[in-house]
Image: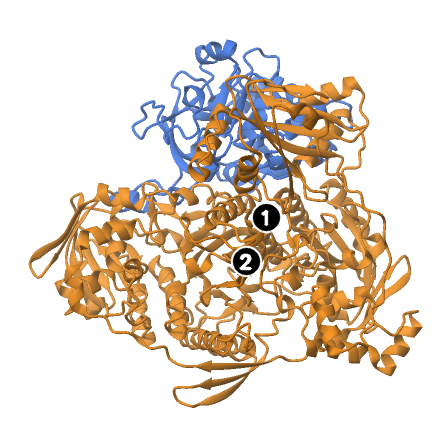
Chain colours: A orange, B blue
Amino acid sequence: MMQTIQITKKENFGERQGANLRNQIKTLLDIETGRILHTKVFAINYSLDDVELEAFAKECLQDVITDEVFINRFDIKDQFLSYIAVAKLPGVTDDEGSSAQMALADFLNAEFDLNTQHIFSQDIYYFEKELTAVQLQNIAVKLLANPLINKITVFNQYQHKSAFKNLYVPIVNLVSDDRTEYIDLNISDEALLSLSQKMVLALNLEEMLTIKNYFNRDEIIKQREKQGLQSQPTDCELEILAQTWSEHCKHKEFNAIIDFKNLDTGKQKKINSLFKTYIQGATSVVQKSLEAKNNHWLIKVFSDNAGVVQATKDLLFVWKVETHNSPSALDPYGGAITGILGCNRDAIGTGIGGAKLFFNTNVLCFGPPNYSKPLLKGQLHPRQIMDGVIKGIEDGGNKSGVPTVNGAILFDDDFAGKPLVYCGTGALMPNQFDGKDAWEKPIDPNDFIVMAGGRVGKDGIHGATFSSVELDEHSPQSAVQIGSPITQKKLADFMAKAATQGLIKSSTDNGAGGLSSSVGELAEITNGAIMNLEKVPLKYSGLKPWEIFVSESQERMTLVVEPHKWAALLSLAKKMEVEVTHVGDFTDSGFLDVRMNGACIAYIDMEFLHDGVPQKKMIAEWKQPFVELFDANKYQDLDLEKVYRDLLADFNIRSRESVIRQYDHEVQGKSIVKPLMGNGRAPQDAAVLRFGFDSYEGIAVSNGISPRFGDLDPYEMSCGAFDEGIRQIISVGGELPNRKENDDIFWSVNDNFCVPDSEFHPENNVDGKEKLAKLVLMAEGLYDMATFFDIPLTSGKDSMKNDFKADGVKISIPPTILYSMTAKVKDVRKVVTSDFKQVGHLIYQLGETFDEMGRSSLFKKLEITAGTAPKVNKQAAKDLYLKVMDANRLGLIASSHDLSDGGLAITLAESAMDSGLGAVIDLDGLGDLPDAVKLFSESHSRFLVTVCENNQIEFEKIFGSRATKLGDVGGDEIKIKSKGKPIISESLGVLLDAWTTAF
Amino acid sequence: MKTKALVITGFGINCEEELAAAFRLAGATADIAHINEVLEGDYSIHNYDVLSFPGGFSFGDDLGSGKVMANKLKYKLLPNKNTLLQELRIFLEEGNFVLGICNGFQFLVRLGLVPNVGLKFEQEATLTQNDSGLFEDRWVYCKVNPDSSSPFLHGIDVLPLPVRHGEGKLIIKKELEEEVLNKNLHVLTYCNEDGKPTTKYPFNPNGSAHQIAGLTDPTGQVLGLMPHPEAFLSLFNHPNWPAMKSKNPDIDKKGLGLKLFENIINHISKKQLKKATTWVS
């Protein structure tokens, strides 16, 4: 019998939390709820007697100081008139329920089945005021729950007795169904396409036909016959092919043959794979250049879950950045947390596996929080997406003990349909585990396939194929996954220990496509595998065999274990309470052989599985957009002081402190430059961490991204974002690589392309050719920058269908690229931060300002569409960066901040506000440009630095004309003069108030 | 002989590496053991001088921070049929030391090791959700109670440290509050940069009663605190180090947090020396 324990707060406790929620509801929904109580209910499906149940409630669930317990009854409070109960839907991760199970097992010193759910937690909220069911639903959906994963019940004071009595409990009631079905592909082309759609295979006609032909080949029919299979594919086989051939896994568009035509010049070219030509191509060129100078730190690129470089004599640095956009659009919290945890698993599953997570980063693009356009069907409000995603990033990092060291948040109406959620993870591995090179991934036939971590359920089925289609109001619910950071933390701790002891031979993560992808990919190394699906541990029964194989249930790794080490691995896993299961073996049969209770249900040629997908053909056409010129006379009408304050409060510029404080950015104790420095408010260009406690060698981490310029000039947008990433690292005191032989300065960059649907379609995507051309130009920018600076891309990802379609409307993101950069810092004690240090220091701008106001923060604010995008002058940039490196070697720079969003004026304020040290500057040295351009242009490759007077001569000797002296540090105002006249005079307090406006 | 520290980890604890580093940098040896390795007898706490519980999210803070872990120590039986709590009491009776930081403090409070005014090892206080309702990472100032006898805090006056928690608001049972204060068990309180007490947010980051950031037990052998001394082992961990160094190039490059670990190791060495001398004579 199901028993219940309710935990409520005693009088005078929990009031503050209730008041916080009440305020949130008032602000966001304009509903007055009166007092709110939050209570928790545990439904218990173990058989416990009354004494045990009561003791368990009081000892394990209740806090004696603050809580009251109600056993098999509920706290009835007549003064509360409305209620919301939020339970999990069947099969959704219930960590609290699981922890309660653990507590019960410890309490009774009894063996319980802890791997499946027997205690179910839920939240019940009490509201003082009488609210309508519609209001309650609204509160629930906007603030307390997500209908995709939660069961919401609302009721009032007249219904509450029966509501409590009939409380929903998410027991999974699925009828066991281990049938495998055959699917006839000998049907018409139209029928093939609709089959692909119906099964969410996301395969196009050519791909469907390729599969049809494969199964109709005589030798294949014969081979399958021997395994007892009919000639047509099983559902499992089709699903495996769909997962493996998904855009997510195979990057079909990045590997397509593209016909590129420049309509302005008439020039045409054929690009055989954007990835091979520009990304891998750039890294090959860089690698040759590095090797020529005897720099050998580039260890592993593009061939594993993450890039690997040599960080120190004894340590390897692993770097991976991913996106999790589609899941975050549907379930912001779940999408973000599984994004960050999934990225963590990529790092843990690189090489042998077992790397230690070192830090996380995140870059988030949302619609503005005050978005006021009507929402489309299925579209969540940007505010709700933002709050959920941030909470997901918070829990994903904090609960895993991984510091979130660096990030960015960008706002634009175009992100209101689909947000961009970039998650990055850096990790460290020793050079070797138990005498074996840690970055290698050796596998031999007869090695065990071992699944480790969480169990398999129906959650996350079709994630890989689903991310390859655009979102609409019918997007499948099963695609949502819920992360459990604690399950994964246990798994990560176990992997690190097992790898150190030499118990793991290789590993990879279970991400998109689940076991079908992880086993399928690893099996390429030995050329075959045999899987026994009945051995895979399940959360609950009732999954079809193909569902077991493709499910993307989280927190699982696939390990390769040598048979003679299995016993030791199993015993370590047991000690650390991580479930490991031997689910199959690697072979050299040439086939992926999947069995259920001995019967073969899939038998696919390895070569066809991995290389059978036909290369896509796409068309790109480019025409330079018309650039409107801006009439400089209009600058005279600007109230510069007002503009200054407004820009500081702009969503894209205002302080991120309220968000950053919720991320643990210093756990592990190695942070040297945190996201906020000085007195706790000064934003920084790059994060700096040291690798260990016994040396000062470390790493700088930056992000380059500027989607605003993408539509105007995608090539320069890409170059500019790359430059931003570099200059931020140079700003904190990093160094460019490959300047001398054996210089030991690694750089490791991940590129993440996010673009709208770029495949031309005469009705659904008329501007597809132009969108694809933008992607090509972005990739060309990447190539030119990487090869010019000798900075290698080591891993990355592309996300191709970032559109939201509903009610006949399509919201597409602007073409966006993120460069996530990391570089070695030889001595972290010598790094430079952005905040002013002392009164009297001299202020300089390094680099040159141009009239490049197109899509600048200022023009965006003023809704001006004219102007050109900023361009990168690579040679001038490099020359300047070398000078900055020279100056830093001599310790001449006291503070440095790169110029980006909002230009010089914003950078100046950001350097001043936290330190409380003002500035007096004169713009005349910056040449013959309008004041607004000098203040707000976003030209690249520039810095604002301060220098102690004693160092002035030496500093100016290094920089010559590249440094413009602007003024000095002092006072408590920003005072800006031009042509002898004061043009801005604002107190730091006023600026700080504007800048620290909460979101 | 070097002081020996045991650092407990597992199930979501995540500050074990830097806590072990703190002990090592201060001159001790430190082993990191999974809690199950202790419960199954692979490690005995009695082989150590200091037992420490690091920060993190044991069991994800489910059922209340530190609660499930405390439950394990109270009820789970060791191979010798004692609970680990019973072993811990013996460990303390023998004059050894226990340190709990953040999640470790939450756990010590739930286990009844601090403030333990009744000396009954019963829960007398709780650490509950911050007034802000949010997890927050920020640096705060902590004033050391000059009348406290905690050997961990000897010679420290104001200690800047980061807090990183969502449940750090201390509430002491009403009837015991006065005793805790009278006995000076509130060894660390949040203060402003000048060391002056203040109830203001964010100086008091969580709304803790009497601004309490850390508690000891009446013997002084147990210390629990919300802020993270192991996150301030080097000057370069401080958010304002560049300005501090710019103004004073000769500033001490050691972090003030390290002092707490040096203190306890000195204290134990002196005690051992005394013991050894007594024994020889």
**Residue A846 x/y as whole percent:** 24, 64
Question: Which chain letter goes with mark 2?
Answer: A
Are the numbered discs 2 and 1 placed on the same chain, yes or no? yes
**Residue B170 x/y as whole percent:** 49, 23
Q: Report which residue position mark 1 lands on.
A: A334
**Quadrant of the image containing the C terminus of chain A:** top left
**Residue B190 x/y as whole percent:** 39, 26
Task: Say which amino acid is labelled 2.
Answer: Asn
Q: Secondary structure at mark 1?
A: helix
**Quadrant of the image containing the N terminus of chain A:** top right
Q: Secondary structure at mark 2?
A: helix
First of labels 2, 1 by sequence position: 2
Q: Judge by depth and name the residue closer to the eye, A257 or A109.
A: A257
Please say if A879 is above or below A48.
below
- Badge 2, how many Cα within 10 Å: few under 14, some, many 20+? many
Looking at the rendered structure, which numbered label has been put on residue A325?
A: 2
- Badge 1, how many Cα within 10 Å: few under 14, some, many 20+? many
Whether residue B100 is visible:
yes
Whether residue A744 is visible:
no
Looking at the rendered structure, which numbered label has been put on residue A380?
A: none
Q: Is residue A621 left or right of residue A159?
A: left
Whether residues under marks 2 and 1 lie with C-beta atoms below 8 angstroms apart, the answer is no
Task: Say which amino acid is labelled 1.
Answer: Gly
Residue at 80% from the left image edge and 65% from the top image edge: A235
Q: Is residue A446 left or right of residue A358?
A: right
Q: Judge by depth and name the residue closer to the eye, A344 or A163.
A: A163
Residue at 30% from the left image edge and 72% from the top image edge: A868
Residue at 35% from the left image edge and 49% from the top image edge: A683
Q: Judge by depth and name the residue closer to the eye, A75 or A788.
A: A75
**Residue A186 x/y as whole percent:** 82, 77
